[in-house]
Amino acid sequence: MKLPGHDAIARQADEHLVTHRVKLPTKVVERPIRQVAKRLSMALLVLVATALIVYVDRDGYTDNSDSSVDLLDAFYYATVTLSTTGYGDITPVSDGARLTNIFVITPLRVLFLIILVGTTLEVLTERTREEWRLNRWRSALRDHTVVVGFGTKGRSAIQTVCATGLKKEQVVVVDPSSQVIEAATADGYAGVMGDATRSDVLKRAEVQRARQIIIATQRDDTAVLVTLTARQLNKAAKIVAAVREEENAPLLKQSGADAVITSASAAGRLLGLSVLSPAAGMVMEDLIQQGSGLDLVERPAVKAEVGKTPRETADLVVSVVRGHRVLGYDDPAVGTIESTDRLITIVRASPGTRVVPDVRPLPRA
């Protein structure tokens, strides 16, 4: 008989037993099991070759038990010789057999040891190299972006940010699934496997030194816990989170999120707009998809635009960010553009299009 909450307690206990791992992006190489299998095949090939050489020249060997050497004795001699055990019960007695041992079997013995010992040394060297790489990565990581949850929302969010100039080396993905982390590292991102509601997992992602944090978990309650933990570790980072239910958005803002996106409502609004006007829906989808067609970008006002109205600029200005206020292009409060303003504009996407991030914290409700 299971008590209420038994499964949840068991899952939490299992999570404590899981080692939180940091995995850096690597080049596509052969799988370790395939490498080991290849090494063992080579070692077996050397063993068979040595046994055949001994069997062909079996008349030059003597066995202390019956003086004759058969195929089994040849394999036995090859095994104890290549492994440097050397019991001495089978020995070469003819000059030809001894020369063969000197010039053929001895090099094969060295090759056999290189194959087996080299595999162990390579594993130790790889571990040392990976540890050194990890320490160097941690010491150099500053002002990066942490993405909690690499599902459809998290992947789309980081692809949009990277399309505007963010380097993949400045992105760290946190997710409890090993398969998801494998996919993230295959895409070129660093990954941390573990539960992001735990502070030690976020510390492995260096969240305390991050500039921005994207929270795209599958559950709203998890998003709240991750936001609370992340805000506790980093008071200055910009935290943007996604929730499924709109009623949970205020709770997430109270937990420390600078901006909250309601995924279900946003998708519903886009669906409704597409029903009323399919063309308008296509334009909106194009605007939020960075790197193609039309892009909605935020940038600082340039010197040539200062003193002009939003309608007089070369780009199509839709809003002006002044301080912590977002003003429409036709708002009388805008007047003329000031040097400290940031402009939200619609531009034609091009390889040179870049969004200059706003490092100021967003106002919280």
Image (cartoon, helix red, strand yellow):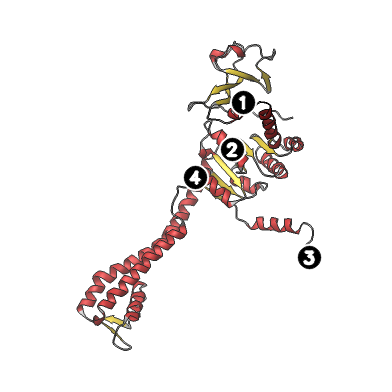
Near mark 4 (Cα within 10 A), the count class, few <14, some 14-19 or many ≥20, is few
Q: Nearer the viewer, mark 4 or mark 1?
A: 1
Sequence-wise, the earlier of marks 1 and 3 is 3
In the picture, which quadrant includes the C terminus?
top right
Q: Quadrant of residue 207?
A: top right
Q: Which residue position holds label 4? A: 136
Sequence-wise, the earlier of marks 4 and 2 is 4
Q: Residue furthest bottom?
A: 66
Asked if residue 238 lies left or right of residue 108, the reply is right
Amino acid carrying mark 3 in the image: Met
Q: Nearer the viewer, mark 4 or mark 3?
A: 3
Q: CA distance from mark 4 to mark 1?
A: 50 Å
Amino acid carrying mark 2 in the image: Ser
Q: Does residue 77 sit above or below 246 in this rendering?
A: below
Q: Which residue position holds label 1? A: 279
Q: Secondary structure at mark 3?
A: loop
Q: Secondary structure at mark 1?
A: helix
Residue 334 in view (yes/no) = yes
Q: Which residue position holds label 2? A: 156
Location of residue 265 in the rendering, given as x and y in whole percent from the top left corner: 71, 34
Sequence-wise, the earlier of marks 4 and 3 is 3
> Residue at position x 31%, y 82% from top?
70
Asked if residue 129 lies left or right of residue 262, the reply is left
Sequence-wise, the earlier of marks 2 and 1 is 2
Q: Nearer the viewer, mark 2 or mark 1?
A: 1
Residue 260 in view (yes/no) = no
- Residue 219 marker: none
Location of residue 90 in the rendering, given as x and y in whole percent from the top left corner: 31, 82
Q: Nearer the viewer, mark 4 or mark 2?
A: 2
- Residue 1 marker: 3
